[in-house]
Amino acid sequence: MWKDKRYHSLDYELRKVFGRKTIKLSLDGGFTCPNRDGTVGNRGCIFCGEEGSGEFAAERCLSISEQIGNQKEFLSKKWPEGKYIAYFQNFTNTYSTCEDLRQKYEEAISLDDVSGLSIATRPDCLNLDILDLLEEFNMKTFLWVELGLQTIHEDTAKFIRRGYDLSVYENAVRELKKRNIRVVTHLIFGLPKESTKDILDSVRYVAKTNTWGVKFHLLYVQKGTDLYEYYKKNPFHILSKDEYINLVCDAIELLPENMVIHRLTGDGKKELLVEPRWSLDKLRVLSGIDMELKRRDSFQGKNYNI
Ligand code: SF4
């Protein structure tokens, strides 16, 4: 149904929309996060390192054009006909003034071969002015907004210090959908104290939001995070590779066919990653998911209406 996959991948969707390979370029817009600067919290989410996503340490001091130029130079060798999505990924990418945001988003989409914009943020950083700004960009480019929900369970949300309630996410989704803006929700599998049922209940909930996409993450215990300190004192269950593959396949079956799956597993930083080390072999995890879906003779949407 989705070329060679049994699920609706982002690669499939972007090829359908743009007619060619379209690649996300990860950007650091120089923003911070209200969950770190004291507005909502001081130490951030329990799994988040001081530099946000570590891959950006060197990029933060470069302009948006320079960051895009550097990545394009590298990627265009493999994909000479490729198009790009400017992905504002690190920290909270609507956490600034509208002028600053407008200038950075505009700079990104004005560059050659950039066909769209992806903005990762928190649902509590979308006031009316920002929503209007996003609506404006939604009319001139292919835009989606990514929201870090991680879980629907309030006990877990408190434990991970997410800093907002589920109702805040619900309101953000409502406001974005009102403006026809595509929404992608992030969920994390393997959070402490969450059972398989808890995780799949979060998936079931997101499946029913009628939003554009979803991203599944595996919980990483990384050095330099409070989660690592917690784990040393309270070693909790770390998902095995087989457990994770089974969970992802169960989750894929629960999603509607039209929901775009942006990610099935992540890219942990080798030198920071404590657990689960098996996740470093990403290709093996992805092929394990393909094999398990085949073994089950299953596909995305199989259990959506159950
Ligand atoms: S919202 Fe994102 S950037 Fe902010 S502390 Fe949590 S994980 Fe880190």
Image (spheres, grey):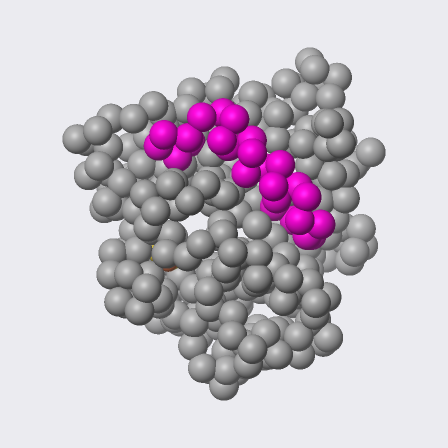
Image quarter hosting the N terminus: top right
Q: How many labels does the image show?
A: 0
> 118 or 305, which lies in front?
305
Q: Which residue is drawn at 27% across and 40% down?
A: 227
Instruction: Point out residue 114 in the picture as x, y percentages from the top left corner.
Output: 65, 67
Q: In which quarter of the image is residue 297?
A: top right
Q: Height in image: 59 above or below 236? A: below
Q: Height in image: 46 above or below 143? A: above
Q: Is residue 231 left or right of residue 166?
A: left
Furthest residue toward bottom: 99
Q: Height in image: 48 above or below 136? A: above
Q: In which quarter of the image is residue 216?
A: top right
Q: Residue at x 77, y 44 (%)?
A: 258
Image quarter hosting the C terminus: top right
**149 within the magenta span:** no
Instruction: Point out residue 41 in the picture as x, y percentages from the top left corner.
Output: 28, 61
Q: In this view, does 63 lie to the left or right of 225?
A: right
Identify the magenta region: 190-214
Instruction: Answer with the quadrant where ligand 1 appears in the image.
Output: bottom left
Instruction: Point out residue 49 in the picture as x, y percentages from the top left corner.
Output: 29, 51
Q: Height in image: 237 above or below 271? A: above
Residue 84 visible in this rendered orientation of the protein: no
Instruction: Point out residue 167 in the picture as x, y percentages from the top left corner.
Output: 51, 56
Furthest residue toward top: 295
> 4 or 157, which lies in front?
157
Q: Residue at x 29, y 26 (%)?
A: 236
Residue 220 visible in this rendered orientation of the protein: yes
**193 within the magenta span:** yes
Q: Residue at x 68, y 52 (%)?
A: 211
